[in-house]
């Protein structure tokens, strides 16, 4: 019986910790995410600053991680229990990331019909 009580106490404590973390992070909202164009403007303002360049390379690396996560997200399985809500929020936030939206816009523009058909190309 004591093992069951310990397990229940741990689960209750874990749930309270998760709720606390969610409360703290929801109270400290992030600034608006930067688009690729915003990052390019920052780069062009300080091309000589090696720290800015290093940070922008790190941002590029992290954006690529988000894109890979988005590409694989269809294969992810939603976990059961408490972490299911965290998973849902992560997937919702992932779909609204600027790098994901920019990729989707680029893919959509590539799939559009061309303005001017090439010689010998029939209209779709």
Image (tube, rainbow, N blue to C red):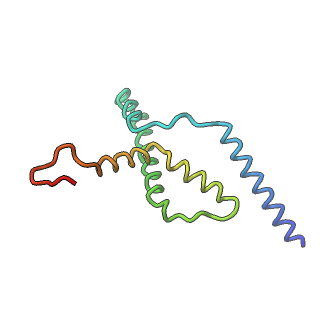
Q: Is residue 65 left or right of residue 43?
A: right
Relative image position of residue 68 (x, y in whole percent): 44, 56
Q: State the quadrant of the C terminus.
A: bottom left
Residue sitting at the far right: 1
In which image quadrant can residue 98 be found? top left
Relative image position of residue 30 (x, y in whole percent): 58, 37
Q: How many marks?
A: 0
Q: Is residue 75 left or right of residue 1?
A: left
Q: State the quadrant of the N terminus.
A: bottom right
Relative image position of residue 79 (x, y in whole percent): 62, 64
Q: Residue at x 43, y 45 (%)?
A: 101
Q: Residue at x 46, y 55 (%)?
A: 70
Work out whether 60 lies above or below 15.
above
Residue sitting at the far front: 123
Q: Which of these two is toward me, 65 or 81? A: 81
Relative image position of residue 106 (x, y in whole percent): 34, 46
């Amino acid at each position: 019986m004591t093992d069951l009580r310990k397990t229940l106490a741990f689960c209750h404590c874990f749930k309270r910790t998760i709720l606390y973390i969610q409360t703290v992070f929801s109270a400290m909202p992030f600034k608006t995410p930067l688009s690729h164009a915003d990052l390019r403007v920052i780069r062009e303002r300080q091309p000589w600053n090696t720290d800015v360049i290093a940070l922008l390379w790190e941002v590029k690396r992290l954006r690529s991680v988000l894109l890979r996560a988005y590409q694989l997200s269809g294969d992810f399985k939603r976990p059961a229990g408490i972490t299911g809500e965290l998973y849902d929020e992560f997937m919702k936030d992932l779909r609204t990331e600027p790098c994901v939206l920019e990729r989707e816009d680029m893919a959509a523009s590539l799939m559009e019909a061309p303005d001017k058909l090439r010689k010998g190309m029939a209209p779709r």
